[in-house]
Structure formats: C-alpha cells, structure tokens
C-alpha cells in the first residue's frame, strides 16, 4: 500500500501523506520519527519553531535510508523575515538537520502586521534558496488569498504549496480553492483537528461502517480531496494506524457528509493568519 505522490508546480514529487512533529518535545522526536520511518512514512514536516529539527535529522540518518527517499520540510521562524536574518536562519535549519538541502522550505506565517507588512522580500529570499539548490522546492504557510495575490503580482515564483489549517470542522475553502486554481498544492495542517474530531457522532457512524478508526476516515477524506497531510502522533500504534489508509475508499455520499461538517470560521482552531503576530523570544 504505497503512499501516492503529488507533483508540485515545479515538477517535483511529494508523498501525499507524511508525519508532522509539531509539539513533539525535542528529546522524544528522534524516537517518534524512527517509529514513523519504520511504519513506512517517507515525508517529515518540521519547523525551526518546533525546536526539534535535530531529532528529525538524527532519526533520518539512523534509519540508513537513501536521503533521496525521504522528503523533509522545514519552515522559517517568525523572527527572521528580513532577508539577512532569513539567510542565517536557513543555514541554521540545514545545520540542525545535519543536511545540505531540504526538500521544501516554507515561510511559516505571513505576519502581515509585522515587518511593515513585507513578506515579499522574505519570499524573494526563499527564491535564492531554491535557485542555489539548498531548497528543492519553496512554499508558504498560513497565507490568505490576499497574501497569495500579492506574491503573484510582485514576484516571479508561484509557491509550490500553501500549508494551512484544514480539517472537517474548518475546511478553509476559499484559500484551498485559490490554490487549486493557481497550481498551489494545499497541505492541510491539523488534519484531524488536533484530536477534536474524535468524538464526532457522524464520523463515528461512518468509521463503524468501514471498520476503520475516525482518524483513518478523516485522513482518507483529505487524500480523496487531493490534500497533502502529515498527522502527528507520539503513539506508535497511532503512527501505524494513520498510514494504513490506502486499502479503502470512501464512497461519494460519505465524502459529502464529511464536507457538510464544515463550520466555517467558527471551526478554526488555530490563530487567524491576518492577525497572528507571535515572535518567539
Ligand atoms: N504550518 C503551521 O502553522 C502548522 C500548524 C500546526 C501544525 N502544523 C503541522 O501539521 C502537523 C499535524 O498537525 P497537528 O500536530 O497540529 O495536529 P493533528 O495531526 O491534527 O493531531 C495531532 C493530535 O491527534 C492525536 N492523534 C494522532 N493520531 C491519532 C489517532 N489515530 N487517534 C487518536 N488521536 C490521534 C495526537 O495524539 P498523540 O501524539 O498523543 O498520539 C495529537 O494529540 C503538525 O505536526 C505540523 O507538522 C503546521
């Protein structure tokens, strides 16, 4: 049951399902990523902000896999949007991972209320990393439609991905639709709403019928919508469960029933990117 790949707008392939490491404490990261690699994951999503890039790098090296067979994403932290800071931060990310490239590097948040609203020069700095080959692909995260439109008007590179909060309760449709229309792949963060979907009666009924868990049904729903997902877990059994979603298919009425769980803005669990201005000290 191989994980399918999606071809990005720069011609590079990304495994559609990966493993997220947000909120995995640094001392536990190597073990969690090792479990994931053993379970068959070949795509890891980390960030400088998570403080655990070292653990990701150690696990990948210890697995003895060909580096080309593992897809690694990291992200620029919020304090480093100015070009010179971004260049230094990217070097620190490569150093922490113990690598000379990442497969994908993202601007973590647009921060439109900071840096005089200038995420354009930050994006142009990521274009340098792509040009010199140290970031095989570049993209953004938490960008709203207006932010994407500004990049389209003022820069030469369309982001390969936009990583946004997206799950049954917050389907973020306007941003995802802009991505589909402009060749930007959508990565759905918090794909199982950080566990909040687990008691849902509608999902429980569907999961029972397919003899799958709620997490598996929701992850399958994302896959069938063409989303890229990387559920996080520190639990070995759940890590295995979350990748075992390629032996069944949801029928269209069930997909539509899950589509109908959208609560719009009320379903958002994380910060609103138009206002978010957190800079870690
Ligand atoms: N770009 C951004 O701003 C941004 C923001 C947030 C997340 N992300 C990325 O997206 C990834 C995924 O999002 P997330 O970590 O926020 O949330 P998530 O993957 O939706 O949910 C993780 C939570 O669900 C639990 N869980 C996992 N598998 C389960 C299962 N099969 N059954 C029951 N519970 C299960 C985990 O518990 P245990 O760990 O205890 O098993 C954890 O509490 C992150 O790790 C990160 O890589 C990006």
Image (cartoon, rainbow, N blue to C red):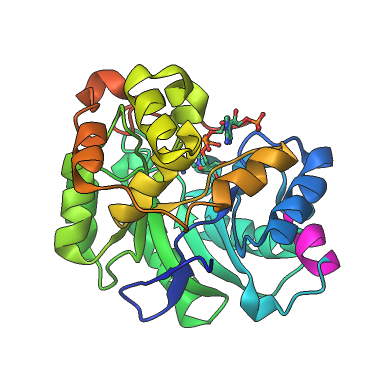
**266 with respect to 121 (left or right):** left
Q: Is residue 28 above or below residue 10?
A: above
| Residue closer to the observer: 154 or 226 | 226
Q: Examine the structure image and report whether residue 60 is included in the region drawn in magenta.
A: yes
Q: Quadrant of residue 72?
A: bottom right
Residue 264's x, y, as percent? 21, 25
Chief secondary structure of the magenta portion: helix
Q: Is residue 71 above or below residue 85?
A: below
Residues rendered magenta in the picture: 56-62
**185 with respect to 217 (left or right):** left
Q: Which image quadrant shows ligand 1?
A: top right
Could one spot residue 271 in this view of the protein?
no
| Residue closer to the observer: 28 or 274 | 28
Residue at 62% x, 56% y is 89
Residue at 30% x, 42% y is 117
Residue at 52% x, 49% y is 230
**187 with respect to 98 (left or right):** left
Residue 228's x, y, as percent? 41, 55
Residue 57's x, y, as percent? 76, 61
| Screen quadrant of the C terminus | top right
Callout count: 0
Residue at 55% x, 56% y is 18
């Amino acid at each position: 049951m191989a994980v399918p790949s999606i071809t990005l707008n720069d011609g590079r392939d990304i495994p559609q399902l990966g493993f997220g490491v947000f909120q995995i404490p640094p001392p536990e990261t190597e073990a969690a990523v090792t479990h994931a690699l053993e379970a068959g994951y070949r795509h890891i999503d980390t960030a400088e902000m998570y403080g655990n890039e070292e653990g990701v790098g150690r696990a990948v090296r210890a697995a003895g896999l060909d580096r080309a067979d593992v897809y690694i994403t990291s992200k620029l932290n919020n304090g480093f949007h100015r070009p010179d800071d971004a260049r230094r931060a990217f070097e620190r990310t490569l150093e922490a991972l113990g690598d000379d490239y990442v497969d994908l590097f993202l601007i973590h948040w647009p921060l439109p209320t900071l840096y005089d609203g200038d995420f354009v020069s930050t994006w142009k700095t990521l274009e340098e990393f792509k040009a010199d080959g140290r970031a095989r692909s570049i993209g953004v995260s938490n960008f709203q439609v207006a932010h994407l439109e500004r990049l389209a008007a003022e820069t030469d590179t369309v982001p390969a991905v936009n990583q946004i909060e997206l799950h049954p309760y917050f389907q973020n449709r306007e941003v995802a639709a802009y991505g589909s229309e402009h060749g930007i792949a959508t990565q759905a963060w918090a794909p199982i709403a950080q566990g909040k979907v687990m008691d849902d009666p509608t999902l429980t009924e569907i999961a029972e019928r397919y003899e799958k868990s709620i997490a598996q049904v929701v992850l399958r729903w994302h896959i069938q919508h063409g989303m890229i997902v990387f559920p996080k877990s520190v639990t070995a059994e759940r890590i295995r469960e979350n990748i075992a979603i390629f032996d069944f298919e949801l029928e269209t009425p069930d997909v539509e029933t899950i589509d109908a769980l959208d609560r719009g803005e009320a379903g958002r669990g994380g910060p609103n990117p138009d206002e978010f201005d957190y800079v870690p000290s």
